[in-house]
Amino acid sequence: MGLGLQNLVASTSLGYPLPGECPDGQLSDHRSGDSLAELSSAAWSAQLIGVRGSLPASGRQTQRTGGATTTLLVRSSAGVLLVDAGSGIANLRIDEGVPIEIVFTHLHHDHICGLPFFTPLYERGREITLSGVGRGEAAWSQALVGAFQPPYFPVPIERTWDARVALRALAPEGDEPLLGVNLRWAEVPHPGGATAFRIETERGALVYAPDVELAKGADSLVALAQGADVLVVDAHFSTEEYPRHVGWGHSTPAQAAALATSAGVGKLLLTHHAPWRDDAAVEALVDEARQIFAAADAAREGMELLFLDPR
């Protein structure tokens, strides 16, 4: 399988310069629509639009890693799939007529805070689907739109949309074709519940689990991630920090590396970086993970994974 891993420094698909350095000095200048045309042979790409957890981070000390909260952008010839709607989604522009679906791992604020600022929601003629697993007493759709109602938001969010928006509830576990890829998902340990997703074609597989407390149970995620080319997983706390935060729903680099080893993945990317952690501290956590799993790195905002050739 041809897998290209780039840490981009510029991309017009996001509409603003991205942090980081490109190892080979090359730049990408894709727009979302252009990428879809280029990926017409069933190749696909995934781009990390946000890699922070809890709260966006800003300042020179976080420029290489990035400061936007959790979002994954998946592009194929069939459309655009987003996982979560963190703060970085506000800068995303998607060409007219491209189908869009957003699936949510859960509804904690860092995973939904960008939704009211997602431009396609205010474009007439758009068709957008929002999907997630229902948890608790309220229906999933009620829980989502309820986060953006007075007094928490100035106007009811659903009244502002010009696009045709469908909201659908997912079962706790599932497997379905969606927008040119196969999407499989499972529940993982996190306060209130959370979902991990596996995105796959014959060209490769990526597993995305930005919020999971692996010490509370990793079996479902080991099964979901088995043999994946790339695993993007929560490593919010350092080993020293974790004992003071048991039950908060997050993992450590060592736990993430042990998971990657058990699942036999090709590449591990640590994500959901704490907002207080600067670039140097993120790299220190990567070094910790590499002691257990050599093919570990930090997830960085703008990093793009290209799944080009059949396995």
Image: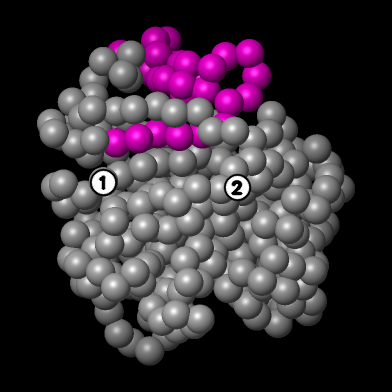
Outermost residue to the right: 243
Q: Name the side, left or right, on which 155 lies relative to 173.
A: left
Q: Residue at x 72, y 33 (%)?
A: 191
Q: Is residue 10 above or below residue 207?
A: below
* Residue 275 appears in the picture as rendered: no
Amino acid carrying mark 2 in the image: Trp
Q: Position of residue 237 (x, y in %)?
A: 72, 53
Q: Is residue 193 above or below residue 291?
A: above
Answer with left or right where residue 42 lies relative to residue 230: left
Which residue is under mark 1?
99
Mark 1 is surrounded, within 10 Å at the Cα level, by few (under 14), some (14 to 19) or many (20 or more) other residues, namely some
Residue 144 falls inside the magenta stretch: yes
- Left or right: 204 with respect to 215? left
SS type, badge 1: loop
Residue 9 colored in magenta in the image: no
Amino acid at pointer 1: Pro
Q: How many neighbours does mark 2 have within 10 angstroms: few (below 14), some (14-19), or many (20 or more)?
A: many
Nearer to the camera, 29 or 261:
261
**Nearest to the observer: residue 85 or residue 277:** 85
Q: In terms of secondary structure, where does tag 2 sit?
A: strand
Disc marking residue 52: none
Instruction: Tell me which numbered mark, 2 or 1, is placed earlier along the sequence.
Output: 1
State the residue position of label 2: 185
Q: Residue at x 80, y 53 (%)?
A: 219
What segment carries the magenta color? Answer: 128-155
Residue at 23% across / 28% down in the picture? 164
Residue 293 x/y as whole percent: 74, 77
Total marks drawn?
2
Q: Are marks 2 and 1 in contact (CB under 8 Å)?
A: no
Query: Which percent across, then down, holds residue 300?
Result: 48, 65
The answer for how far apart the CA atoms under marks 2 and 1 are is 21 Å
Q: Residue at x 34, y 69 (%)?
A: 42
